[in-house]
Image (cartoon, rainbow, N blue to C red):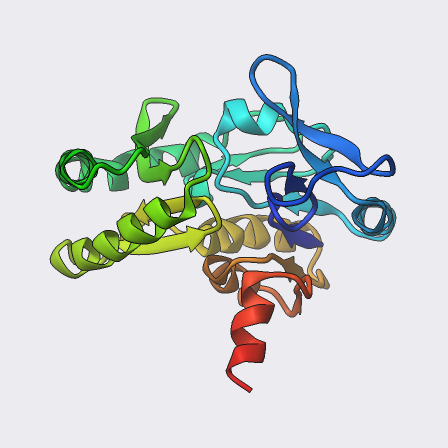
Amino acid sequence: MLFVDLDDTLFHSDRKHAPTPRCVPLAFLKDGQPISYASAAQQSVLHMLQQEMEVVPVTARNLNAFSRVRIDFRSAAILNYGGTVLDAQGQIDAVWLERSQRASAGSLAALSALEQRLLEHCRSAALALSVRTISDHGVAFYIVIKSPTNQLQDIEAVAAYCATLCEEFAGFRLHRNGNNVALLPPWLDKSHAVAWVKQSLAQRHPDLVTFGMGDSLVDLAFMNECQYMIVPSASQIAHARMAAL
């Protein structure tokens, strides 16, 4: 069983890697335009993984964004940083969703306050960034900040401000990768959902062997739920590890 992150692991956005003729589009915008592509190497890896393993995507994408990924997943899926679990038929795991609803209720006030603080900071600092709370199925999950024009200096500035907010709002975690900054409440973690899905599958497959694959530091927790880890060399995880040598 492979639990695998999507963006920057199985494919990359066209902003990060301009597509070549050998690339294939795997993720699309709401208007149907391709936005993310798999290289020839990524296509080969995906084919191999799907031939040899049962593949479970583990992604920050909500249901709408996940529905625009053109990969034929045939097992469970984990969305919204672990806030949502789908079964093999694409149906929402009602027990896990209820768990998320209860947990989210305790972070609504903090999420609202954080979003307002971030909007005010971006206005006062003249940062051209979008700030919004990501919700799905009526559940508020986390806050995401992006630069519509890929102004990484603005992202750097807001990430520094978010770090101070995390000190003030106990338990909130900062995730930064490329053009995205996310603020995650204490209860939301991909690793919790991976543990839940793994427990369910292990009841049917007691000798289940699990692999975790991801690119971001935030992925390490869910990868650690698995027996083996796979990391792309051009990834945040790999860069951090090599810098520590």
| 176 left or right of 222 in image | left
Camera-side residue of 12 and 86:
12
Q: In this view, does 109 lie above or below 8?
A: above
Residue drawn at (55%, 54%), measured in percent from left and top? 199
Camera-side residue of 58 and 1:
58
| 67 left or right of 216 in image | right
Q: Quadrant of the C terminus?
A: bottom right
Camera-side residue of 81 and 152:
152
| 108 left or right of 209 in image | left
Camera-side residue of 49 and 157:
157
Residue drawn at (66%, 33%), measured in percent from left and top? 88
The residue positioned farthest toward the bottom in the image shown = 245
Number of marks in picture: 0
Residue drawn at (65%, 18%), measured in percent from left and top? 33
Residue 169: % across, % down? 15, 54
Residue 35: % across, % down? 63, 29
Q: Quadrant of residue 66?
A: top right
| 62 left or right of 140 in image | right
Residue 187: % across, % down? 30, 50
